[in-house]
Amino acid sequence: MHFYNRGQIRCFLKIAELANFSLAAEQLNLTPTAVSKQIKNLEQVLNEQLFLRTTRKVQLTDFGQLFYKKCKHIEEEIAAVNQFVEANRATPQAGAFHD
């Protein structure tokens, strides 16, 4: 069973979209070291390399491209669920007790 967290997925998606670890770190308000560590841990859990890294560029591996599509879909679904919850949240009735 694979155990990875949403923070790792967010880092992965941001790097995939920007093709740059440093810019991704900046946009996520993390250090480049923290972002690199998140990706390293994610790759270890998956037992797959997600990015081809050179000194000049970062690009997704074939597995990384497939994983990106799945992760992007999941993030979109989570956003849709959150919007649904906000739109359908019961509003407190007048005179209801609040703690």
Image (cartoon, helix red, strand yellow):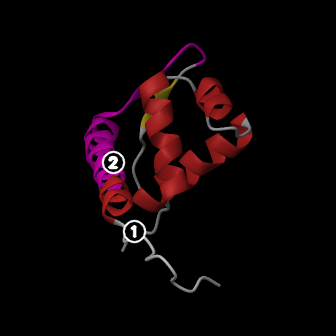
Task: Identify the residue at image location x=26%, y=46%.
Answer: 73
Frontmost residue, 53 versus 80: 80
How far is disc 1 from disc 2 in space, using C-alphas? 14 Å
Q: How far from the left and from the top, in percent, is residue 1?
A: 36, 74
Identify which amino acid the numbered label 2 is placed on.
Cys
Frontmost residue, 17 versus 87: 87
**Within-10-Å neighbours for mark 1: few <14, some 14–19, many 20+:** few
Q: How far from the left and from the top, in percent, is residue 13?
A: 44, 38
In the rendered view, would you say 54 is above or below 34?
above
- As drawn, the label of residue 2 is 1
Report the side of 87 relative to 38 (left or right).
Answer: left
* In this rendering, the label closer to the viewer, 1 or 2: 2
Q: Secondary structure at mark 1?
A: loop
Q: What stretch of residues is rendered in magenta?
A: 55-80
71 magenta-colored? yes
Residue named by callout 2: 71
Identify which amino acid the numbered label 1 is placed on.
His
